[in-house]
Amino acid sequence: MLDWNDLRYFLAVARTGSTLAAGKSLGVSQTTAARRVAALEAAAGVTLFERRQAGYVLTAVGEALRERAEAVEAAAHRFAEDAGSHGREASGTVRLTMQEIHAVTIMAPILRDLREAHPTIRIELDTSEQVRDLEAGEADIALRCAGRPSGSGLVGRRVADEPWTVYCSRDYAARHGTPRRARDMIDHVIIGGGGKGVWRIYRAWLEQHGLADSVAIHHDSATGLLSAVRSGMGLATLPCFVADTDPELIRCVPIPKEVERGVWLLTHERSRHIPRVRVVLDFLGERLTQLARRQAQAGTGMAPGSIMPASAVQDQSGSS
């Protein structure tokens, strides 16, 4: 069986013309250099050198294979350089953008653990409602809620489905009961809002079921909806990926059977191989997928997705 390390001896002898000089360049004895070349010839089943009194001379076969051996040597050097680069450069700042509701709930413990695992990486967290342009370099990584991605330039992983449905707090349910259908919500306090994109869909659903007049307070962000529901004020629609992790919340209305939108972890193709970005992508991807899998096993309907190319994501919720 061919020992790849023997190629080093082959090239050293080819370049110096003797096993003595090759041994010195590699820090081994002449005997070792000669033995390793002989072992390579035996494993390959060819004669690589003519042994002459003046030294070793490549045969025609040896000349033909020298270029191949040098290509292997170059590839090994590149591997070592890239590995060293990853080890050295997995540090610095990574700019991460997402909705505030994700930042203050599911992502808070994940980012804590990321810091403990990779203390040389600094996270700049942007929770603006404005969608950041990854292609233009406005952020390195985005956690984005969207439907089917399209276009070019971005690569991403759909880490979970992203249905929304109605929730209340356990305290509210103890005082007022838990409605299980939309028509049962008519006598309950409803919290509206959630941001421009969310409210457009949420309001249409309320109007469809004759519930628009039951809205008692309007919050301009999804985080506001979550806070109001937690306080026991009333009912509101919330993202299941977030709400199902909160033991104080109760799902009232079943989620739709078909879920088009998903939670995506995205970066630009130019950035995906930068060591610090790759480390953060892999860490967040693994943890978010684990969370989705736990929710699926608990019967909450979440499902982790797979890696696929994406670009120009059509974001309806105003996520970053």
Image (cartoon, rainbow, N blue to C red):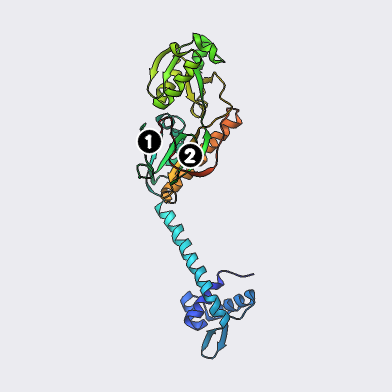
Q: Which residue is mark 2?
A: 149
Q: Which residue in the rendered view is the most extreme toward the bottom?
A: 53
Nearest to the observer: residue 319 or residue 207:
207
Q: Is residue 193 rendered to the left or right of residue 255?
A: left
Residue visible at 51% across and 74% down in the picture: 67
Instruction: In the rendered structure, find residue 228 and report the number of the disc placed on it.
Output: none
Q: Secondary structure at mark 2?
A: loop
Q: Does the image show residue 278? A: yes
Task: Kindly identify the amino acid type of the residue bearing the numbered disc 1.
Answer: Val
Q: Position of residue 303 (x, y in %)?
A: 57, 34
Nearest to the observer: residue 163 or residue 29:
163
Badge 2 density bin: few <14, some 14–19, many ≥20, Cα 10 Å: many
Identify the mark nearer the N-term, 2 or 1: 1
Give the foreground label among 2 and 1.
2
In the displayed structure, would residue 230 be above or below residue 273?
Answer: above
Q: Does the image show residue 235? A: no
Nearest to the observer: residue 313 or residue 111:
313
Q: Secondary structure at mark 1?
A: loop
> Where is residue 216, by image quadrant?
top left
Q: How many marks?
A: 2
The reply to whether discs 2 and 1 touch (Cβ–Cβ < 8 Å) is no
Residue visible at 50% across and 72% down in the picture: 70
Q: CA distance from mark 2 to mark 1?
A: 14 Å
For the N terminus, the quadrant is bottom right
Badge 1 density bin: few <14, some 14–19, many ≥20, Cα 10 Å: many
Q: Position of residue 218 (x, y in %)?
A: 39, 17
Q: Position of residue 23 (x, y in %)?
A: 50, 78
For the C terminus, the quadrant is top left
Task: Kindly identify the amino acid type of the residue bearing the numbered disc 2.
Answer: Pro
Q: Which residue is mark 1?
A: 131
Q: Is residue 106 rendered to the left or right of residue 180?
A: left
Q: Position of residue 189 (x, y in %)?
A: 46, 12
